[in-house]
Amino acid sequence: MKCLCVVVCLLGGWAMGQDRQVVRVYFEDESDLRDFPVAIDDCGVNARERYVQVTVDATELAAIDLAGLAYKVDDRETRALNEPSGMESGAGIPGFPCYRTVEETFDAAVQMVANYPGMATWTDIGDSWVKTQGVGGYDINMLTLTNQSIPGPKPAFTISGSIHAREYTSPELVTRMAEHLLANYGTDPNVTWLLDHHVFYLILVLNPDGRKQAETGLSWRKNANNNFCTNTNTRGIDLNRNCTFEWACCGGSSSSACSETFHGPSAGSEPEAQALINHLSTTYPDLRPPDLTTPAPDDTMGLYIDVHSYGGYVLSTWGFTPTPPPNAADILRIARKITFFNGYHPQLGSLSTVDGTTKDYSYGELGVSGYTLELGTSFFQDCATFENTIYPQNLEALLNIARYARAPYLLTRGPDPIQLEVNPPTATPAQMITLTAMLDDARFGTQNGVEPAQTVAEAEVYVDIPPWQGGATPIAMTADDGTFDETQEAATATVGPLSEGVHSLFVRARDSAGNWGAVNAIFAIVLDPVTSPKLQGLVRNANTSAPVEAMLTAGIYGTSSDPGTGAYQLLVTPGTYDILVQADGFVPQILSSVTFGAGQTINQDIFLDPICVIHEEDFESGLNGWATQAPWQLSNEFANSPTMAMNDSPGVSHANNLNIAATSGSIDITGANGIELRYWTRYELETNFDYGHVEYRVDGGAWNEIDLVNGVQTVFQQRQVAIPATGSTLELRFRLTSDTSVTNDGWVFDDVQITAASSACGQSLSSMIAQWPDPISVTQLVFQVNQL
């Protein structure tokens, strides 16, 4: 512990004028972080690779050496301290096109309000520090989402992004969540009831001044207050140390103006922190005194999440003391609900001592459980990881935890209804509807302990009126095995007959301890096949005219075509729809803006372009045209199927200072469209330093990157990426780059496939025979058919 204290003491500040570096200092045990005498930032802790990221000057770096601690200079972050990236601007942040700039984010919010005027509002809740000085700066705006036609009171769920400027992922996640909610209202039953019966307050960019600095590539954390550490790139106040509850109380922030955790001259001194505090204090009722011992009421409404990066944690109160908060068991349980979906580490409190934080203000002043959600593995997170992992996992986590906002301390104690299904999918007004569900009392993350589970005791269904509203009438569900006596139970209810239209079925369950869980919902669709508008016809293969089994959806309405004949009939209500037609092995097709009048029948045959594999390589019979730079080679050390794969360093760790590639031969893509790459991979690469680049080029032109791997993935996973290519020939390149130190097991890939829609896919037998050179044998014909 003595050596670790030396590391932390480096964070208090640095001598002006000295060169500074960002270094990673490696630790042995995560529990040591809590005892640091001077604050480090939770955002800079990587638990998987056991390091803490700190900013030091030459004197402090010498102290690390003297203490005998292992460290590594982060060259990228060090450059980003003082030098803008210099990259040309385009759509998104330069070099990171998946992340919108401040202006693009605000424009997206304005567009949401324009597109959904009854669901979204964009409100000015304060000014940035620069704007308070009279020249430049930004309004701090909040996007509010709810169905305004349904009265409250409604539970509030506040999410804030970009309180720390350089954490690229946070505002994009919150913005995309807003877009997802609005785009899926009326078609996703859970999104629909969440917006009907909740209010989402989304502060997309809480620190816009700092964010603009970080968009240039600077490693900017704080706001842009130039009264402290004046005219440097480390000026400003850490807004997540400036909140008024337990401000500067406990060594969890710094009094040094140039420190990244500088708490400011006084509690709540910064206009950005004031905007958040004013929102929270006027939105949520004050349900507990500001002491450290009085619990919030069990039925407290609302949640607050402050989105950060990085580390893969869900952190909670208290941050300034290891003493658990009064509602500790419930607070940790909520965190475990979140981590069930994103696989993160739920933590009661913080990893280190922090004070004056947003989450402690939310709970300490108001009783509303607050959390810090630490996304991903880097401040400047690569787009591939964000798009493929961080966004989908955390969107699901946020949407799920929103279901508990009505009473999170209580509802997280009860079972979850999942896997809801209705049969028939579309009923007639005379039919009864069978609803099935799985009731699960154990849906919690297990990364930091196991949450106790109880047996399910009962479950019930409500039609159109949720259980908390007057007039709601329960319909009892029965256990499929005859008795509710397990922590997971399959259950069934019969509902109906129902009137024509779309009905919401709300399902909830209670456990043996008497705890009701949050509701889940599904739509029950009732249409009269005689009088309802309909689209009907055949779905066929565009190349062969063979029938295709396809799924057709128009909003919430759907049907499938007959596999033997391709015939379908899609029932809808009057209106205009985009109709999506999908089938395995075919390019999806959208029939845009199809308008149905009352009782109208539209006849439409649909022809789908087939997708086929135009190139594949499993490496079982050699390189087959692949060119490799040493030490890339085929190896049986790891393989997806069955024995051989391409490996950058078989049997050993990869070397430092590498830039080596395995490159495919030329692949014919003449006439192909909708090209996609699918490959299986595993990798162990130093996070943010060593990378696997997947690239392509067309007709011998420039190389273009389409995928990027980094970090640790020790189980083979399939990755699928689009290749926006047109031309005659395609080449693929898998390129490993490594830095000057720290090596790992490296990168392996296998089972490479290129798929596309092409006129050669699914040729008819007659056309195939016509193309085959004479004379044709039965053996040749069978071989050719098998290749199709």
Image (cartoon, grey):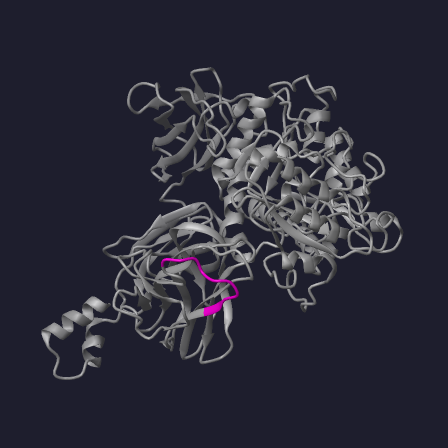
Residue occupying the point 70% across, 53% down: 106
Judge left or right: residue 426 versus residue 325. left
Query: x, y percentage for residue 74?
Result: 63, 56
**Relative to 252, does residue 611 appear above or below in the rendering?**
below
Which residues are drawn in magenta?
651-660
Q: Position of residue 569 (x, y in %)?
A: 34, 51
Say whether residue 349 is left or right of residue 19: left
Q: Is 279 situated above or below 481? A: below
* Residue at the image position 68 percent from the left and 67 percent from the top: 89
Out of 599 and 541, give the one closest to the viewer: 541
Residue 432 is situated, as x and y percent measured from the top left of the image, at 34, 30
> Where is the N terminus found, in terms of image quarters?
top right
What residue is at 46 percent from the left and 80 percent from the top?
700
Depth check: 719 or 246 in front? 246
Magenta part, dominant SS: loop
Count of numbered marks: 0
Quarter location, residue 698: bottom left
